[in-house]
Amino acid sequence: MTEPTLYGLPNCDTCKKARNWLGRFDVAHDFIDYRANPVPAATLKDWAAQLGGWEKLVNKSSTTWRNLLPQRKNPGSDPEWTLLLKEYPALIRRPVVVQPDGSVSVGFSDNGFKKLFTR
């Protein structure tokens, strides 16, 4: 991989803002719709580990999270988390940015992207 990859949903406003920012600053990137191209469980586990845990990868303020049954909101193991995210990909914070070196970050802000992409 020689350029960053954004994982997200094409109709997500935050993903659109992130992609527009990258276009405005001429940052070449790949975009992967993780609903159409599900992320492997091992990759989800790696992302969570790099970010500091599943809590950092999952968007608990989303409508999808609020609509989950209470017993689904407390996964106790990595396999339970990956199953939940496979079933509800919209729970993954957006966008997930994977750099060519494999480092991972989530979310979009103008200042955050300036730090990520201007060296």
Image (cartoon, rainbow, N blue to C red):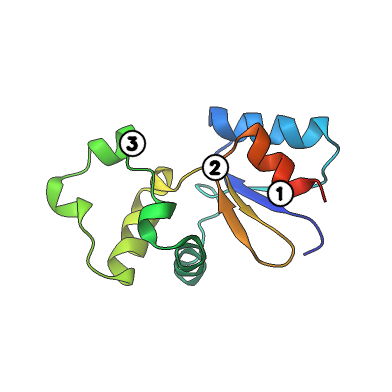
**Residue 89 in view of the camera:** yes
**Mark 2 secondary-structure assignment:** loop
Distance from Cα at disc 1 to Cα at disc 2: 12 Å
Q: Decide which of tag 1 and tag 2 comes sooner along the chain.
A: 2
The residue singled out by tag 2 in the image is 107
Residue shown at 20% from the left, 57% from the top: 74
Kind of residue at badge 2: Gly
Kind of residue at badge 3: Ser
Q: x%, y% of residue 30?
A: 73, 49
Q: x%, y% of residue 112?
A: 64, 41
**Residue 11 in view of the camera:** no
Distance from Cα at disc 1 to Cα at disc 3: 25 Å
Drawn side of residue 111 relative to residue 80, left or right: right
The residue singled out by tag 3 in the image is 61
Question: Is there a contact, CB below 8 Å, between mark 2 and mark 3?
Answer: no
Q: Decide which of tag 2 and tag 3 comes sooner along the chain.
A: 3
Drawn side of residue 7 relative to residue 1, left or right: left
Residue shown at 35% from the left, 35% from the top: 62
Mark number displayed over residue 116: 1
Distance from Cα at disc 2 to Cα at disc 3: 13 Å
Q: Residue 83 sits in which quadrant?
A: bottom left
Q: Decide which of tag 1 and tag 3 comes sooner along the chain.
A: 3
Kind of residue at badge 1: Leu
Residue shown at 47% from the left, 63% from the top: 44
